[in-house]
Amino acid sequence: MTGILYSLKDEKKYTFLYSFQKEYLEAHNGNILIFEIWEKGKEELDKFSFMLREMENGTDLKVVDLFSDSKKYYLGKAISRAMILHCKNLFVKRIISEGGNNNWEEARTKVWERMKSNGEVAYCESNDFYFTI
């Protein structure tokens, strides 16, 4: 499946294309939605990676991967935030972060805490994860 993603960072608008597929991955012990995100005209280059794990409760998708490309072209273009909000609406599910030791400090501060400040996500202190509201 393919689609269009829009993001906004520092009043600059970006447009990206994406494709995704669902696979069962042993490493995550579950079904994973694997997204590749790129800018039109840059299809042959490295892409932004975003992965969601379908949770057993049937209502949550957990972000298990959000990485810019190796050359960092896509870094700082608010793709993670845009994908989290886009997937919330696309799949009509709550998007949650990884909690505990799996929650990378950079993702926590640059994505989840900023989204919390904007009122887009909340934080569950007892289980150490963020979730869309």
Image (tube, rainbow, N blue to C red):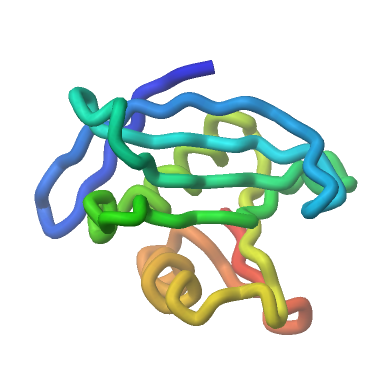
Side of 31 where 83 appears, left or right: left
Q: Is residue 57 shown above or below 34?
A: below
Q: Is residue 28 shown above or below 86?
A: below
In the figure, residue 103 lies in which quadrant? bottom right
Side of 110 where 15 appears, left or right: left
Residue at the left extreme? 11
In the figure, residue 97 lies in which quadrant? bottom right
Instruction: Point out residue 36 in the picture as x, y percentages from the top left corner.
Output: 46, 35
- Residue under the image location 56 percent in, 40 percent down: 88
- Between 84 and 16, the one lying in front of the other is 16
Instruction: Point out residue 120 in the picture as x, y percentages from the top left corner.
Output: 45, 58
- Between 74 and 96, the one lying in front of the other is 74
Instruction: Point out residue 111 in the picture as x, y percentages from the top left corner.
Output: 42, 66
Quadrant including the N terminus? top right
- Residue under the image location 57 percent in, 55 percent down: 65
Instruction: Point out residue 35 in the picture as x, y percentages from the top left corner.
Output: 52, 36
Quadrant including the C terminus? bottom right
Q: Is residue 68 shown above or below 92?
A: below
- Between 25 and 81, the one lying in front of the other is 25
- Residue under the image location 81 percent in, 47 percent down: 55
Residue at the top extreme? 1
In the figure, residue 67 lies in which quadrant? bottom left
